[in-house]
Amino acid sequence: MSLADDPSRIASRFLDARRAAAGLDAYPGPYPESLEAAYAIQDAAIAAWGRPVVGWKVGRLTGELAERFGTDRLAGPIFRKRSANPVAPVEMPVFDKGFAAGEAEFLLRIGATPPAGKTDFSPEEATDLIDAVHVGIEIASSPLGTINELGAIAVISDFGNNNGLVIGPEIENWRESGFERWEVTTLIDGEVVGTGRAATSFPGGAIGAARFLFALMARRGIRLEPGQWISSGAVTGVHPARPGQTVETLFDDRFSVACRFVAASPI
């Protein structure tokens, strides 16, 4: 069996780099030609990593990639979560020899397992499966420094380019809050690097991310559990940062969530 035919071999190379907190100069094997092949690598990596999945990140595909693959989103597992500290930024590890970025996101908590085999969800059906919405920061980081330049295949292959989640305050009465229309701002070391609104940053807003994830997981045969989180998409964009820098996110002047990047240590 060739490396291209064996997802576990590419997955193991990504995992070895994560364990060593090392960098990867290039994609670690023949580049897959389909999203299905990339998700097969992700599945192999999840199985080999052997840690509980605390949530799932949802990212975007745009332009030619969206047309080529017939979807405008992708997903990856989240294994690390921390609660935000209102007094000081929490420390979050990133791969200093790879890629690292902070993303302001709305975090949806799954309240009920979606029906098995159901692959199409209306906005109302997806909303009914969510029991809470928080604000937070996705830590996008991978040993592969060129992961975002390479695109969706590479991102899916390595845990969706995720290395953690910072969970901020809960949005009370989130169904009536209009949170998807809130203006969101991201700052790095105090300087504004992006603004946006969930309703206009990606199709269907944050609930659209939940609809996508529920359908995708049904097709992949993965059971979603109550209490898992959905990191629903980068509202202000993807903003690279390095160890030592502080990423702060503001949500409609109501909430602030901050974290400080530190270099990941070998496991």
Image (spheres, helix red, strand yellow):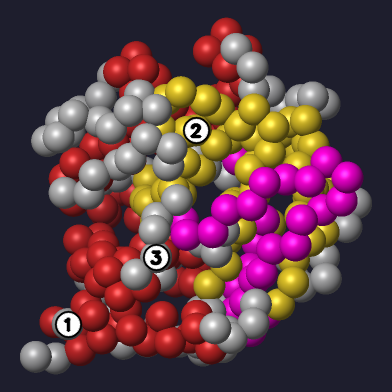
Label 2: few (<14), some (14–19) or many (≥20) C-alpha neighbours in 10 Å: many
Q: Nearer the viewer, mark 3 or mark 2?
A: 3
Residue type marked 1? Asp
Front one among 180 and 95: 95
Establish if 131 lies above or below 256: above
Which numbered tag is attached to residue 6?
1
As measured in the structure, the alpha-carbon distance from the residue carrying label 1 to the one carrying label 2 is: 34 Å
Label 1: which secondary element? loop
Q: Are marks 1 and 2 in contact (CB under 8 Å)?
A: no
Task: Assign the C terminus to one quadrant of the image.
Answer: bottom right
Q: Is residue 181 visible?
A: no
Residue identified by numbered label 2: 108
Amino acid at pointer 2: Leu
Q: CA distance from mark 3 to mark 2?
A: 21 Å
Q: Residue at x 30, y 18 (%)?
A: 125
**Going by the image, does 145 lie left or right of 123?**
right
Q: Please determine whether, in this image, residue 136 is positioned above or below residue 19.
A: above
For the point 39% across and 58% down, the residue is 52
Nearest the viewer among 197 and 127 is: 127
- Which contiguous range is marked in magenta? 77-105
| Label whose residue precedes the other's in the sequence (3 or 2) | 3
Marks 1 and 3, the one that precedes in the sequence: 1
* SS of the residue under disc 3: loop
Q: Quadrant of residue 42?
A: bottom left
